[in-house]
Image (cartoon, helix red, strand yellow):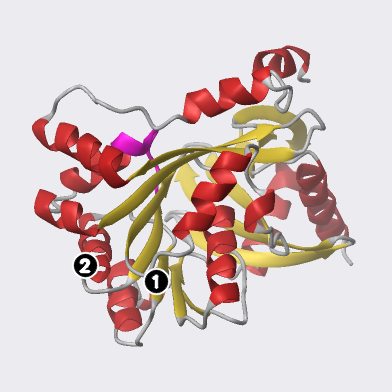
């Protein structure tokens, strides 16, 4: 193993041990700042001499399949590293900036196959998630900020479904975050012309029972997902919005007809990661389904004040009151 390889592996494992979700390489004239995103906050952890950092970035670009000579255009790549506890998948993205090239690395624990019952902080949320596993058709959307565990929850839900019946599950992702032999997994490849809409059309011709879409990014993907749910498929996907109602508003902004949403929507779930009293990561959820979902959709369509709260903040406060959840304000005050 070369010195550059050793440095990169040491950096990634340090980020993993600190529970970081992302690593940022931000170049300046004479140095590069290395920042970790932990608990949603970016903090500088290292400063490397610019020449050393440039060599490390070039190594990572090569290892992840990027063109190391191309610094004028954005690029994306991925790679996997092995460590004592398993493996760590990395998703890399570069963009050209005034001082050179900026790199962001997303950390994706490849062996993080969690059971659906172990994810939520509260038992009531566990019951709601298990109820989703019984659905046979409709659109289920998970929403929340980057790094809030949406993909982990979707995979746990798919695993739960597979335990009860044989279903053909197809996922379309960019990249494939958690390899599963039991599922048919397709990776978006924009360089080869395979975008989300084209991949989804191919997936729907492959007779799926369940379709998992890594993320709805545009109106074409949104409309395909909704139509798939309307034609008898169960569709799981994510959106980056602050809350459950924001997901419905985003779909309307993408041009999805309101009557399609009334027919296709099964549930919208807002998710956040928190730390319990034992400093273990747990998820709290806000659910919209059945009559409350229809009521909020009415409000979104008519642009009225919302008539229903998804309960996310209530779960957080309940967790603190029961002593199950660390007080985030106190944790932040002691963070380093």
**304 sits to left or right of 154:** left
Question: Can residue 150 be seen in the rendering of this structure?
Answer: no
> Residue 146, percent across and down?
51, 42
- 235 and 320: which is toward the camera: 320
- 229 and 36: which is toward the camera: 229
> Residue 8, percent across and down?
78, 54
- 116 and 145: which is toward the camera: 116
Magenta stretch bounds: 239-246
Residue at 12 percent across and 37 percent down: it is: 301
Where is the N terminus found, in terms of image quarters? bottom right
Any mark on residue 230, and which? 2
How many marks on residues?
2
**Magenta-drawn stretch contains 40:** no
> Residue 97, percent across and down?
47, 40
Question: Can residue 171 be seen in the rendering of this structure?
Answer: yes
Query: Which of the two discs, 2 and 1, labels the residue nearer the N terminus?
Result: 1
Tell me the CA gap for discs 2 and 1. Answer: 12 Å
Would you identify the image quadrant in which residue 212 lies? bottom left
Q: Are marks 2 and 1 in contact (CB under 8 Å)?
A: no
**111 sits to left or right of 68:** right
**Pointer 1 residue:** 211
């Amino acid at each position: 193993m070369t010195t550059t390889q050793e440095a990169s592996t040491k950096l990634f494992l340090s980020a993993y041990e600190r529970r970081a979700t992302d690593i940022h390489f931000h170049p300046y004239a004479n140095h590069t700042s290395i920042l970790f995103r932990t608990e949603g906050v970016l903090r500088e952890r290292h400063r490397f001499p610019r020449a050393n950092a440039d060599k490390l970035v070039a190594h990572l670009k090569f290892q992840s399949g990027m063109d190391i000579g191309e610094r004028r255009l954005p690029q994306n790549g991925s790679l996997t590293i092995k460590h004592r506890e398993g493996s760590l998948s990395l998703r890399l993205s570069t963009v050209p900036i005034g001082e050179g090239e900026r790199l962001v690395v997303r950390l994706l624990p490849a062996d993080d196959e969690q059971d659906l019952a172990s994810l939520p902080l509260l038992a009531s949320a566990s019951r709601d998630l298990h109820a989703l596993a019984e659905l046979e058709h409709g659109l289920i959307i998970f929403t929340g900020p980057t790094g809030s565990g949406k993909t982990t929850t979707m995979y746990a839900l798919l695993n739960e479904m597979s335990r009860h019946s044989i279903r053909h599950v197809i996922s379309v992702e960019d990249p494939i975050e958690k390899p599963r032999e039991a599922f048919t997994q397709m990776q978006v490849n924009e360089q080869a012309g395979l975008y989300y809409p084209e991949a989804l059309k191919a997936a729907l011709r492959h007779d799926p029972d369940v379709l998992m879409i890594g993320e709805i990014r545009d109106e074409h993907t949104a409309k395909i997902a909704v139509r798939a749910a309307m034609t008898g498929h169960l569709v799981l996907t994510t959106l980056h919005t602050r809350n459950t109602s924001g997901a419905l508003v985003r779909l309307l902004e993408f041009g999805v007809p309101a009557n399609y949403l009334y027919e296709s929507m099964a549930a919208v779930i807002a998710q956040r990661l928190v730390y319990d009293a034992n400093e273990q990561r747990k998820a709290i959820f806000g659910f919209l389904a059945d009559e409350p979902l229809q009521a909020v959709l009415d409000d979104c369509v008519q642009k009225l004040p919302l008539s229903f709260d998804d309960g996310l903040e209530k779960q957080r406060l309940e967790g603190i009151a029961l002593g199950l959840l660390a007080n985030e304000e106190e944790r932040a005050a002691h963070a380093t």
